[in-house]
Image (cartoon, helix red, strand yellow):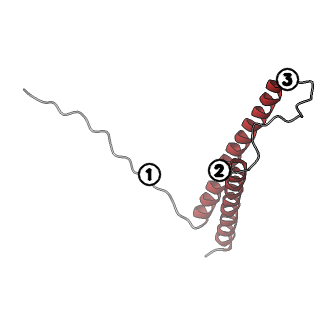
Amino acid sequence: MQKGDLVGRIVGMLVFLAGIGILVFVFIAAYQYFNSNAIILKPSAPATATTPATTRLGESAVLLFGRIALLIVMAIAGSQVASRGIQLYFAAIGHRRTITSTPAQEPHETTE
């Protein structure tokens, strides 16, 4: 085994583990967001404020959708990092992915 292969395998495994760590963080954050005892769409200001309740409710809804979008982006990023780590690891050990394709079959003529 060459030194480059060992370093590549280690870097690939570290990148893969970093991606898995990002995914674990995303799942923990999502679990905390959706299982919190606080009401998610609560007004952010007290009832005596001059802004109407619908405006405050809209603001908290935008905040909620922003958090959900951030979780989705983080999940995609974690998946991509883990995927790149696996690709680095397999490239370092010399594994080549072979794609086998079957030729398209021509339709058979039927005589009736």
Q: Give the camera-side residue of 69 and 93.
A: 69
> Horizontal and vertical percent for residue 65?
72, 36
At 76% from the left and 32% from the top, the residue drawn is 62
**Quarter of the N terminus within the rendering:** bottom right
Q: Which amino acid does label 1 sit on?
A: Ile
Vertically, is 35 above or below 42? below
User: Mark 3 sits on what residue?
Assistant: 52
Residue 77 vertical position relative to residue 54 in the rendered view, above or below: below
Q: In which quarter of the image is residue 87?
A: bottom right
Above or below for 55 versus 30: above
Q: In the rendered image, which residue does mark 2 sit on?
A: 80
Circle 3 — which element? loop
The residue shown at (75%, 36%) is: 41
The answer to which of marks 3 and 1 sits earlier in the sequence is 3
Q: Helix, strand, or loop for circle 2?
A: helix
Q: Is residue 101 left or right of residue 41?
A: left
> Residues under labels 1 and 2: Cα distance?
22 Å
Work out whether mark 1 precedes mark 2 in sequence or the reverse, and give the earlier one. 2
Which-is-in-front pick, marks 3 and 2? Answer: 3
Residue 64 place in picture, x, y as percent: 74, 38
| Amino acid type at image mark 3 | Pro
Which amino acid is tagged 2?
A: Gln
Mark 3 vs mark 1, CA separation in Å: 61 Å
For marks 3 and 2 on the same chain, the one whose residue lies earlier in the sequence: 3
Q: Name the residue under label 1.
A: 99
- Circle 2: is it few (<14), some (14-19), or many (20+) Cα within 10 Å? some
Name which residue lies at 82% across and 25% down. 55
Could you tell me which secondary element the residue under label 1 belongs to? Answer: loop
Image quarter of residue 8:
bottom right
